[in-house]
Amino acid sequence: MLWAASTWLLSTQHLASAAPLTELSSEGIELAFPRLADTGNAVPLQAHIRAPQGTSLKSLRVILPENPIPLALQLKLHGEPQIYLLSTRLRLAASQSVWVVATFNNGLERANSAPTVITSTACLDDS
């Protein structure tokens, strides 16, 4: 029951902020994520993040609300990158939307999501 409650909470909110993800601007975050995947074992994600003028990226998070552990990746960035390209593969427990949340050095946060449908689960099987 605790897992279900945390999944519901993360589907509408992100970690460390009271603002729902859906209310954050997606400006400057472009995602390449397949709409359909045969398996959830290694679904490719590419995110291109551009910081607003006068700011730099501080951190990135990838959130998978339907996974047993929703926070899939958290990166703290050093230096003052204006543009960041993230390429990774994600293990998905179910069909869901992946969320990428960017935090900038002035405290501003932006988020974007992309949905996918998978035909075979990855996290809840015996592999």
Image (tube, helix red, strand yellow):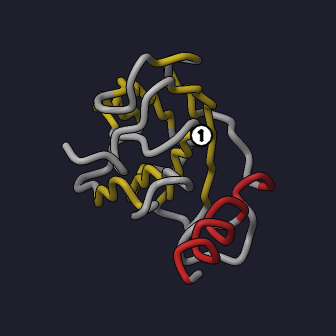
The residue indicated by pointer 1 is 96
Residue at x 50% of width, y 22% of height:
33
Where is residue 18? Give x, y as percent.
71, 77
- Residue furthest front in the image: 126
- Residue furthest bottom in the image: 2
Res 8 quadrant in image: bottom right
Image position of 44 with respect to 112: above or below:
above
Q: Quadrant of the C terminus?
A: top left
Where is residue 43? Give x, y as percent.
37, 26
Residue 20 in the figure: left or right of residue 2: right
Q: Decide which of 95, 73 is in the foreground and name it.
A: 95
Residue at x 42% of width, y 50% of height:
57
Where is residue 90? Give x, y as percent.
34, 37
Q: Decide which of 92, 80 is in the foreground and name it.
A: 92
Q: Decide which of 71, 84 is in the foreground and name it.
A: 71
- Look at label 1 and name its amino acid: Gln
Image position of 58 with respect to 111: above or below:
below
What SS does tag 1 mark? Answer: strand
Q: Decide which of 86, 38 is in the foreground and name it.
A: 38
Image position of 108 with respect to 98: above or below:
below
Residue at x 77% of width, y 52% of height:
22
Res 36 quadrant in image: top right
Image position of 29 with respect to 80: above or below:
above
Q: Residues within 10 Å of mark 1 (few under 14, many from 20)?
A: some
